Image (cartoon, helix red, strand yellow):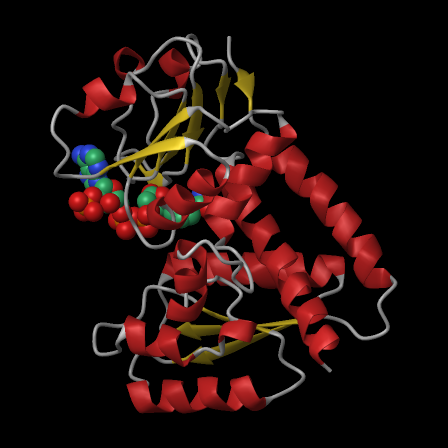
Amino acid sequence: MATILDGRKLKTKILANLKSKIAQMEEKPSLTVILVGNNPASLIYVNNKKRTAEEIGINSNIITYPSSVTEDELLAKIHQLNKDDSVNAILVQLPLPGHISKEKVINMIDPKKDVDGFTPYNFGKLFSGEIPFVYPCTPKGILLLLDEYGIELDGKHAVIVGRSNIVGKPLLQMMLNRNATVSICHSHTKNLADITKTADILVSAVGENIIEEKMLKPGCVVVDVGIFKDAAGRTRGDVDFENVSKIASYISPVPGGVGPMTITSLMLNTVELFEKSKKRL
Ligand code: NAP
Protein backbone atom coordinates (compact mmCIF):
# COMPACT_ATOMS: atom_id res chain seq x y z
CA MET A 1 0.00 0.00 0.00
CA ALA A 2 1.15 3.51 -0.83
CA THR A 3 2.32 5.92 1.87
CA ILE A 4 -0.14 8.79 2.24
CA LEU A 5 1.20 12.26 1.44
CA ASP A 6 -0.50 13.85 4.41
CA GLY A 7 -1.13 17.54 3.64
CA ARG A 8 -3.08 18.16 6.84
CA LYS A 9 -0.22 16.97 9.04
CA LEU A 10 2.35 19.06 7.17
CA LYS A 11 0.04 22.09 7.25
CA THR A 12 -0.21 21.81 11.05
CA LYS A 13 3.57 21.61 11.36
CA ILE A 14 4.37 24.52 9.03
CA LEU A 15 1.66 26.79 10.41
CA ALA A 16 2.75 26.14 14.02
CA ASN A 17 6.26 27.32 13.08
CA LEU A 18 4.88 30.30 11.21
CA LYS A 19 2.67 31.25 14.16
CA SER A 20 5.69 31.29 16.50
CA LYS A 21 7.62 33.40 14.03
CA ILE A 22 4.76 35.91 13.66
CA ALA A 23 4.31 36.07 17.45
CA GLN A 24 7.83 37.48 17.68
CA MET A 25 7.17 40.18 15.08
CA GLU A 26 6.39 43.66 16.35
CA GLU A 27 4.36 44.52 13.28
CA LYS A 28 2.15 41.79 11.79
CA PRO A 29 1.85 40.69 8.14
CA SER A 30 -1.45 41.48 6.45
CA LEU A 31 -3.48 39.77 3.75
CA THR A 32 -6.28 41.48 1.84
CA VAL A 33 -8.69 39.31 -0.13
CA ILE A 34 -11.12 40.73 -2.68
CA LEU A 35 -14.26 38.71 -3.23
CA VAL A 36 -16.72 39.56 -5.98
CA GLY A 37 -20.22 38.04 -5.97
CA ASN A 38 -21.53 35.16 -3.89
CA ASN A 39 -20.19 32.01 -5.52
CA PRO A 40 -20.64 29.46 -2.65
CA ALA A 41 -17.27 27.74 -3.23
CA SER A 42 -15.46 31.11 -3.30
CA LEU A 43 -17.15 32.13 -0.04
CA ILE A 44 -15.91 28.95 1.65
CA TYR A 45 -12.35 29.40 0.28
CA VAL A 46 -12.19 33.06 1.34
CA ASN A 47 -13.50 32.37 4.84
CA ASN A 48 -10.99 29.51 5.25
CA LYS A 49 -8.18 31.83 4.23
CA LYS A 50 -9.29 34.49 6.71
CA ARG A 51 -9.71 31.99 9.55
CA THR A 52 -6.31 30.39 8.92
CA ALA A 53 -4.61 33.78 8.69
CA GLU A 54 -6.13 34.93 11.96
CA GLU A 55 -5.24 31.67 13.74
CA ILE A 56 -1.55 32.30 13.10
CA GLY A 57 -1.53 36.06 13.72
CA ILE A 58 -1.77 37.47 10.18
CA ASN A 59 -4.10 40.48 9.94
CA SER A 60 -6.67 39.65 7.29
CA ASN A 61 -9.25 41.74 5.58
CA ILE A 62 -11.93 40.64 3.12
CA ILE A 63 -13.31 43.28 0.76
CA THR A 64 -16.57 42.15 -0.79
CA TYR A 65 -18.35 43.47 -3.85
CA PRO A 66 -21.65 42.48 -5.44
CA SER A 67 -21.29 40.76 -8.82
CA SER A 68 -22.57 44.01 -10.40
CA VAL A 69 -19.34 45.85 -9.50
CA THR A 70 -17.70 47.47 -12.51
CA GLU A 71 -14.23 46.59 -13.72
CA ASP A 72 -13.15 50.21 -13.17
CA GLU A 73 -14.28 50.16 -9.53
CA LEU A 74 -12.32 46.99 -8.92
CA LEU A 75 -9.20 48.32 -10.64
CA ALA A 76 -9.43 51.55 -8.62
CA LYS A 77 -9.62 49.56 -5.36
CA ILE A 78 -6.56 47.50 -6.29
CA HIS A 79 -4.69 50.70 -7.19
CA GLN A 80 -5.55 52.08 -3.75
CA LEU A 81 -4.43 48.86 -1.99
CA ASN A 82 -1.16 48.94 -3.97
CA LYS A 83 -0.41 52.35 -2.49
CA ASP A 84 -1.43 51.43 1.07
CA ASP A 85 1.70 50.51 3.06
CA SER A 86 -0.34 48.61 5.63
CA VAL A 87 -1.30 46.04 2.95
CA ASN A 88 1.43 43.46 2.17
CA ALA A 89 -0.46 40.84 0.22
CA ILE A 90 -3.40 41.10 -2.18
CA LEU A 91 -5.45 38.17 -3.45
CA VAL A 92 -8.37 38.44 -5.85
CA GLN A 93 -10.55 35.36 -5.47
CA LEU A 94 -11.30 33.76 -8.83
CA PRO A 95 -13.52 33.27 -10.75
CA LEU A 96 -14.70 36.82 -11.51
CA PRO A 97 -18.01 37.66 -13.20
CA GLY A 98 -17.89 37.54 -17.01
CA HIS A 99 -17.95 41.33 -17.51
CA ILE A 100 -14.66 41.74 -15.62
CA SER A 101 -11.35 40.92 -17.30
CA LYS A 102 -9.41 38.54 -15.05
CA GLU A 103 -6.19 39.52 -16.87
CA LYS A 104 -6.71 43.26 -16.33
CA VAL A 105 -7.46 42.73 -12.65
CA ILE A 106 -4.43 40.50 -12.05
CA ASN A 107 -2.19 42.87 -14.06
CA MET A 108 -3.23 45.71 -11.76
CA ILE A 109 -1.86 44.02 -8.61
CA ASP A 110 1.56 45.32 -7.60
CA PRO A 111 3.90 42.30 -8.15
CA LYS A 112 5.43 43.02 -4.74
CA LYS A 113 1.98 42.34 -3.18
CA ASP A 114 0.94 39.54 -5.57
CA VAL A 115 0.53 36.74 -3.02
CA ASP A 116 -0.58 34.20 -5.66
CA GLY A 117 2.40 34.88 -7.92
CA PHE A 118 0.01 35.26 -10.87
CA THR A 119 0.99 38.69 -12.24
CA PRO A 120 2.85 38.69 -15.58
CA TYR A 121 5.89 40.09 -13.75
CA ASN A 122 6.08 37.17 -11.30
CA PHE A 123 5.10 34.61 -13.95
CA GLY A 124 7.74 36.03 -16.29
CA LYS A 125 10.40 35.88 -13.57
CA LEU A 126 9.47 32.26 -12.90
CA PHE A 127 9.65 31.25 -16.57
CA SER A 128 12.87 33.11 -17.24
CA GLY A 129 14.54 31.16 -14.45
CA GLU A 130 14.72 34.16 -12.11
CA ILE A 131 13.24 34.41 -8.64
CA PRO A 132 9.71 35.86 -8.44
CA PHE A 133 8.52 37.71 -5.33
CA VAL A 134 6.63 34.51 -4.47
CA TYR A 135 5.84 31.20 -6.18
CA PRO A 136 2.20 30.24 -6.97
CA CYS A 137 0.56 28.57 -3.98
CA THR A 138 -0.60 25.18 -5.28
CA PRO A 139 2.64 24.21 -7.06
CA LYS A 140 4.62 25.50 -4.09
CA GLY A 141 2.49 23.36 -1.75
CA ILE A 142 2.99 20.28 -3.94
CA LEU A 143 6.77 20.66 -3.81
CA LEU A 144 6.68 21.21 -0.03
CA LEU A 145 4.71 17.95 0.29
CA LEU A 146 7.14 15.99 -1.91
CA ASP A 147 10.10 17.44 0.00
CA GLU A 148 8.57 16.50 3.35
CA TYR A 149 8.48 12.85 2.27
CA GLY A 150 12.00 12.96 0.82
CA ILE A 151 10.80 12.48 -2.76
CA GLU A 152 13.62 13.51 -5.05
CA LEU A 153 12.84 15.26 -8.36
CA ASP A 154 16.29 15.39 -9.93
CA GLY A 155 16.39 13.15 -13.02
CA LYS A 156 12.84 11.87 -12.48
CA HIS A 157 10.14 11.93 -15.14
CA ALA A 158 7.27 14.05 -13.83
CA VAL A 159 4.03 13.98 -15.81
CA ILE A 160 1.53 16.76 -15.12
CA VAL A 161 -2.02 16.36 -16.39
CA GLY A 162 -3.58 19.84 -16.72
CA ARG A 163 -2.00 23.03 -18.06
CA SER A 164 -3.76 25.83 -16.19
CA ASN A 165 -1.95 28.99 -15.11
CA ILE A 166 -2.64 28.21 -11.47
CA VAL A 167 -1.32 24.64 -11.36
CA GLY A 168 0.14 22.91 -14.42
CA LYS A 169 2.18 25.68 -16.06
CA PRO A 170 3.94 27.05 -12.96
CA LEU A 171 4.50 23.52 -11.63
CA LEU A 172 6.15 22.59 -14.95
CA GLN A 173 8.74 25.33 -14.47
CA MET A 174 9.19 24.70 -10.76
CA MET A 175 9.85 21.00 -11.41
CA LEU A 176 12.27 21.90 -14.22
CA ASN A 177 14.08 24.12 -11.71
CA ARG A 178 14.57 20.95 -9.65
CA ASN A 179 16.00 19.10 -12.68
CA ALA A 180 13.04 16.82 -13.30
CA THR A 181 12.20 15.86 -16.89
CA VAL A 182 8.66 17.18 -17.22
CA SER A 183 5.83 16.27 -19.59
CA ILE A 184 2.59 18.21 -19.54
CA CYS A 185 -0.69 16.76 -20.83
CA HIS A 186 -4.08 18.31 -21.52
CA SER A 187 -7.41 17.64 -23.18
CA HIS A 188 -5.83 17.34 -26.67
CA THR A 189 -3.16 14.86 -25.57
CA LYS A 190 -3.38 11.62 -27.58
CA ASN A 191 -2.97 8.32 -25.77
CA LEU A 192 -2.73 9.88 -22.31
CA ALA A 193 -2.07 6.51 -20.64
CA ASP A 194 1.05 5.91 -22.79
CA ILE A 195 2.54 9.05 -21.25
CA THR A 196 1.28 8.64 -17.69
CA LYS A 197 2.70 5.07 -17.64
CA THR A 198 6.19 6.55 -17.99
CA ALA A 199 5.80 8.84 -14.96
CA ASP A 200 7.93 8.47 -11.87
CA ILE A 201 5.80 11.29 -10.43
CA LEU A 202 2.28 11.89 -11.71
CA VAL A 203 0.41 15.09 -10.85
CA SER A 204 -3.20 15.32 -11.96
CA ALA A 205 -4.99 18.70 -11.99
CA VAL A 206 -8.05 18.20 -14.17
CA GLY A 207 -11.22 18.17 -12.05
CA GLU A 208 -12.51 14.82 -13.37
CA ASN A 209 -11.98 11.29 -12.12
CA ILE A 210 -9.64 10.22 -14.94
CA ILE A 211 -6.55 8.56 -13.43
CA GLU A 212 -6.88 4.79 -13.14
CA GLU A 213 -4.46 2.14 -11.88
CA LYS A 214 -3.84 0.76 -15.38
CA MET A 215 -2.50 4.18 -16.52
CA LEU A 216 0.38 4.11 -14.03
CA LYS A 217 3.73 2.46 -13.49
CA PRO A 218 3.91 0.47 -10.22
CA GLY A 219 5.85 2.39 -7.58
CA CYS A 220 5.14 5.85 -9.00
CA VAL A 221 4.33 8.84 -6.81
CA VAL A 222 0.81 10.19 -7.33
CA VAL A 223 -0.27 13.73 -6.46
CA ASP A 224 -3.98 14.43 -6.86
CA VAL A 225 -4.78 18.14 -7.20
CA GLY A 226 -8.31 17.74 -8.55
CA ILE A 227 -11.23 18.41 -6.27
CA PHE A 228 -14.89 18.27 -7.23
CA LYS A 229 -18.23 16.90 -6.05
CA ASP A 230 -19.49 13.71 -7.69
CA ALA A 231 -23.14 13.09 -8.59
CA ALA A 232 -23.80 11.90 -5.01
CA GLY A 233 -22.34 15.14 -3.59
CA ARG A 234 -19.14 13.47 -2.31
CA THR A 235 -15.79 15.27 -2.55
CA ARG A 236 -13.59 13.49 -5.09
CA GLY A 237 -10.19 13.85 -6.70
CA ASP A 238 -8.95 12.97 -10.19
CA VAL A 239 -7.45 9.66 -9.06
CA ASP A 240 -9.12 6.31 -8.35
CA PHE A 241 -7.61 6.36 -4.87
CA GLU A 242 -8.71 2.89 -3.78
CA ASN A 243 -7.02 1.03 -6.64
CA VAL A 244 -4.14 3.40 -7.38
CA SER A 245 -3.03 3.36 -3.73
CA LYS A 246 -2.41 -0.42 -4.13
CA ILE A 247 0.34 0.13 -6.73
CA ALA A 248 1.72 3.64 -6.04
CA SER A 249 4.61 4.24 -3.64
CA TYR A 250 3.10 7.52 -2.37
CA ILE A 251 -0.28 9.09 -2.96
CA SER A 252 -1.98 12.30 -1.84
CA PRO A 253 -5.60 11.91 -0.73
CA VAL A 254 -8.55 14.18 -1.55
CA PRO A 255 -9.41 15.81 0.73
CA GLY A 256 -6.35 16.17 2.97
CA GLY A 257 -3.51 16.27 0.43
CA VAL A 258 -2.83 19.24 -1.83
CA GLY A 259 -5.72 21.42 -0.56
CA PRO A 260 -4.21 22.08 2.90
CA MET A 261 -0.83 22.72 1.26
CA THR A 262 -2.27 25.45 -0.97
CA ILE A 263 -3.56 27.42 2.00
CA THR A 264 -0.29 26.78 3.87
CA SER A 265 1.62 28.27 0.91
CA LEU A 266 -0.67 31.28 0.91
CA MET A 267 0.26 31.96 4.54
CA LEU A 268 3.96 31.42 3.81
CA ASN A 269 3.74 33.78 0.82
CA THR A 270 2.00 36.48 2.89
CA VAL A 271 4.81 36.38 5.44
CA GLU A 272 7.46 36.34 2.68
CA LEU A 273 5.97 39.44 1.02
CA PHE A 274 5.80 41.17 4.41
CA GLU A 275 9.45 40.37 5.16
CA LYS A 276 10.54 41.54 1.70
CA SER A 277 8.62 44.81 2.14
CA LYS A 278 10.40 45.44 5.44
CA LYS A 279 13.79 44.85 3.80
CA ARG A 280 12.96 47.50 1.18
CA LEU A 281 12.30 50.21 3.78
P1 NAP B 1 -8.69 24.14 -15.32
O1 NAP B 1 -8.20 25.52 -15.51
O2 NAP B 1 -10.09 23.79 -15.67
O3 NAP B 1 -7.71 23.15 -16.09
C1 NAP B 1 -7.99 21.80 -16.24
C2 NAP B 1 -6.93 21.19 -17.12
O4 NAP B 1 -7.26 19.82 -17.32
C3 NAP B 1 -6.84 21.83 -18.49
O5 NAP B 1 -5.49 22.02 -18.86
C4 NAP B 1 -7.51 20.79 -19.42
O6 NAP B 1 -6.98 20.75 -20.73
C5 NAP B 1 -7.15 19.51 -18.70
N1 NAP B 1 -8.06 18.42 -19.04
C6 NAP B 1 -9.42 18.46 -19.05
N2 NAP B 1 -9.90 17.25 -19.43
C7 NAP B 1 -8.82 16.47 -19.67
C8 NAP B 1 -8.67 15.14 -20.10
N3 NAP B 1 -9.72 14.34 -20.35
N4 NAP B 1 -7.42 14.65 -20.25
C9 NAP B 1 -6.35 15.42 -20.00
N5 NAP B 1 -6.42 16.69 -19.57
C10 NAP B 1 -7.65 17.21 -19.42
O7 NAP B 1 -8.54 23.68 -13.83
P2 NAP B 1 -7.55 24.11 -12.63
O8 NAP B 1 -7.97 25.42 -12.14
O9 NAP B 1 -6.14 23.86 -12.98
O10 NAP B 1 -8.00 23.01 -11.57
C11 NAP B 1 -7.95 21.64 -11.85
C12 NAP B 1 -8.53 20.87 -10.69
O11 NAP B 1 -7.69 21.10 -9.56
C13 NAP B 1 -9.93 21.32 -10.27
O12 NAP B 1 -10.61 20.20 -9.76
C14 NAP B 1 -9.66 22.31 -9.16
O13 NAP B 1 -10.74 22.42 -8.26
C15 NAP B 1 -8.47 21.67 -8.51
N6 NAP B 1 -7.61 22.59 -7.77
C16 NAP B 1 -7.31 22.25 -6.51
C17 NAP B 1 -6.46 23.03 -5.78
C18 NAP B 1 -6.12 22.63 -4.40
O14 NAP B 1 -5.57 23.42 -3.66
N7 NAP B 1 -6.40 21.39 -4.01
C19 NAP B 1 -5.91 24.20 -6.33
C20 NAP B 1 -6.22 24.51 -7.65
C21 NAP B 1 -7.06 23.68 -8.37
P3 NAP B 1 -7.13 22.01 -21.75
O15 NAP B 1 -6.12 23.00 -21.30
O16 NAP B 1 -6.82 21.42 -23.06
O17 NAP B 1 -8.54 22.50 -21.59
Residue 171 percent across, percent down from the top left: 41, 44
Confirm whether residue 59 shows in the render.
Answer: no
Residue 138 percent across, percent down from the top left: 47, 48
Q: Residue at x 58, y 51 (%)?
A: 265
Image-based side of 213 in relation to 63, left or right: left
Instruction: Please name whichever residue, 146 or 74, is drawn nearer the observer in this view of the structure.
Output: 146
Residue 155 percent across, percent down from the top left: 45, 25
Instruction: Please name whichever residue, 235 or 93, is drawn nearer the observer in this view of the structure.
Output: 93
Instruction: Please name whichever residue, 247 or 165, is drawn nearer the observer in this view of the structure.
Output: 165
Image-based side of 222 in relation to 13, left or right: left
Q: Residue at x 75, y 53 (%)?
A: 18
Image-based side of 1 in relation to 200, left or right: right
Q: Quadrant of residue 97?
A: bottom left
Confirm whether residue 74 shows in the render.
Answer: yes
Relative to 279, residue 193 above or below: above
Residue 143 percent across, percent down from the top left: 53, 38
Q: Residue at x 72, y 58 (%)?
A: 55
All told, the count of numbered labels is 0
Q: Quadrant of the C terminus?
A: bottom right
Relative to 31, residue 197 above or below: above
Q: Quadrant of ligand 1?
A: top left
Image-based side of 99 in relation to 155, left or right: left
Q: Residue at x 49, y 13 (%)?
A: 249
